[in-house]
Amino acid sequence: MTKPINIILRELEIKDLEDYFYWNLPSREFHKFNGPYYGKSNEEELSKQIEDYKTRLLKGERNVLKNKKIIVNKDTDEIIGQVNWYWKSQETLWMEVGIVIFNENYWGNGIGYKALKMWIDEVFADNPKLVRLGLSTWSGNERMMKLAEKLGLIKEAVYRKARIVDNQYYDSVSYGVLKEEWLPQP
């Protein structure tokens, strides 16, 4: 029986920069699933980004990734992936969340479920006025759709033929959860 993997979500630190660079290289497998219809940084751009993080961290800035945290193996301190949030509509208190597991060695181990559940809990706790969270993906990313449904997010929209990957059209799929559906009522 495999030992469960303990994870934490934390800020990026100076000691992480080399590994963070490695796991974000354009050649990494996760890029085929994580918004492959968006442009990606090349290695030179990624290197400049890492240097910027380093400069800011050395100046004492803590949260260089802004609305993101890295997913780390608590026992080995190995970087596994990253979670994020962004405003979909600040006026209506609606955020979107996302997750990516950089390290393929952790794929299929339930890390995405644990990490995204922790992240949704944290985002709702840190933003008490927040009304809803969404998660958007594309129909070619079956694992992300299954993860959203396993977490209890509701499929709310399918935008047909809204994404192009490898010259083929895919649907954009949006999930959501209201705060009162996620958190137990007092």
Image: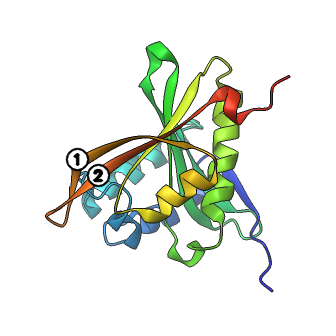
Q: Circles 2 and 1: CB distance less than 8 Å?
A: yes
Label of residue 9 in the image: none
Cα distance in 3D space between marks 2 and 1: 5 Å
| Residue closest to the eye, 151 or 119 | 151
Image x and y of residue 4, in percent = 78, 72
Q: Is residue 21 above or below residue 115?
A: below
Residue at the disc numbered 1: 162
Crowdedness near tag 1: few (<14), some (14–19) or many (≥20) residues, C-alpha within 10 Å: some
Q: Is residue 104 above or below residue 56?
A: below
| Residue closest to the eye, 13 or 165 | 165
Type of residue at label 1? Ala
Residue at the disc numbered 2: 171
Type of residue at label 2? Asp
Left or right position of 174 against 185? left
Lower position in the chain sequence, tag 2 or tag 1: 1
Identify the image quadrant of the C terminus.
top right
Asked where in the image residue 150 lies, by quadrant, the reply is bottom right
Q: Is residue 91 above or below residue 14?
A: above
Which residue appears farthest toward the top when viewing the image?
91
Image x and y of residue 108, in percent = 59, 74
Asked where in the image residue 81 lies, by quadrant, the reply is bottom right
| Residue closest to the eye, 24 or 114 | 114
Please give the name of the residue rendered at 63% of the width and 46% of the height, measured from the top-left corner.
Answer: 152
Q: Secondary structure at mark 1?
A: strand
Looking at the image, can residue 161 be seen? yes
